[in-house]
Image (spheres, rainbow, N blue to C red):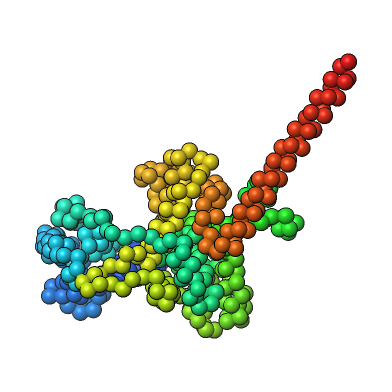
Amino acid sequence: MKLTKNEFQRTMAKSEYQLFLAGIRAIATKEKYVRTLRKVLCEFLEDFFKGDIEDRCAQLVKHGKENPEWTRDLLIQLSEKLKERTKLTKNDPNYLNPSSFRNYFKPIRKLFDMNGVALPWNLLYCTFPEDDNLLDTRGWDGNEIKEMLKFASGTMDRAIILIASSSGIRQGGFDFKWGDVTPIYKIGEELKMEVTEFEENISEIVCAMIRIYKGTKESYPAFITPEAYYTIMDYRRDWIRQVGRIPKPEDPLFKREGVVLQRATPSSIKKRIDRMIMKSNIRRPLKNGERRYEVPIMNGFRRFWNKTCKEALSNDSPLASLIKKEYMMGHRGLVALDRNYFKTHMLELAEEYLNAVPELTISEEERTKIENRRLRTKMQKKNDELHMMKKDMEMIKKRLNLSR
């Protein structure tokens, strides 16, 4: 297998903008970066470049290569200009949260990296304001999530809410396919990701794994409750009825309404959640001058998941338990090297996740079922132990009788 001269093509056959897009695999990230890059080049730097977004990218890259000092000064002064907005009062419509500041420069760095433009980024970062993480916000609670579900319009809405609350995934994580969902079974005390036809009759689904950002370096396993998994299966029947066939592994799990198979974007999924929140009236209206709600729409589910899982008891050491929970949120771990030096098998993560399943389950009926199963398992284990003790006692008696 070799590359021939006829097959060889220069990378520059693609435009600067096309190379920028090629460097982003996750669809949700790509949409966000494009939206932000357009805002920076077509609005903030409108006077410096001409044409559409593709033309402006080409001009910025050209300046970066031919006049790096000019490009550096342009971005530093843009940083200083934006920083003025971080000093405004939070009620001001032009206020910019320092925590969001860096997001305006991430697409530019990606554009430069993909087009071979060198820039002293550390010098630019020195001009950034310090993060303001002292936001007076919180996560959703279980009762609020129950209220949302009362206003769900069909199985798709229910599945979205239960996936969000039981997995803690980000908005962009909703862009997954049917093949990315894997049920996890339990037979006795053993967890399995695959079971035989015979084992199906003696096993139960205790949770399911979803591969988030599959095919990218940010990929990680998230987990959902049995309640969420069975709701997905209910939605699957509606999916089949609309499309007219069984979903293939590569088909998008969430689709737009109707017979046409078109993926539902993460932003459209957020809108569906927002509609349920507004109908349930669980959010107080913003006061004059306020720009942020007490609970962020998507991050509110993430905070609910994080709080619930961190409070759940674990059979692991506190440090190992914490690292596993960070993995399940898509974080690297407690430190950057955790992902390299602390490898955990999917079933070990699932074992950790199961500790939080009762509290992550929203329906009281489903929660009762889980608790009953847990009690039955506990009683069965005690009965097995008593049975073994009885057998041991009988064996000891026999030995004693034989020795006489």
Asked whether 318 or 65 is in front, the reply is 318
Asked whether 122 or 7 is in front, the reply is 122
Query: Is residue 95 visible to the viewer in this orientation of the structure?
Result: yes
Q: Residue at x 17, y 77 (%)?
A: 50
Q: Along the horizontal axis of the image, is 78 left or right of 314?
A: left
Q: Residue at x 43, y 40 (%)?
A: 319
Q: Tell me residue 83's x, y (percent).
A: 15, 62
Specify the quadrant that holds the C terminus.
top right
- Eyeballing the image, is 257 above or below 92? below
Q: Tell me residue 282's x, y (percent).
A: 39, 70
Q: Residue at x 48, y 79 (%)?
A: 256
Q: Along the horizontal axis of the image, is 291 left or right of 337?
A: left
Q: Tell me residue 253's x, y (percent).
A: 52, 71
Q: Along the horizontal axis of the image, is 174 left or right of 12?
A: right
Residue at the top extreme? 404
Asked whether 40 or 377 is in front, the reply is 377
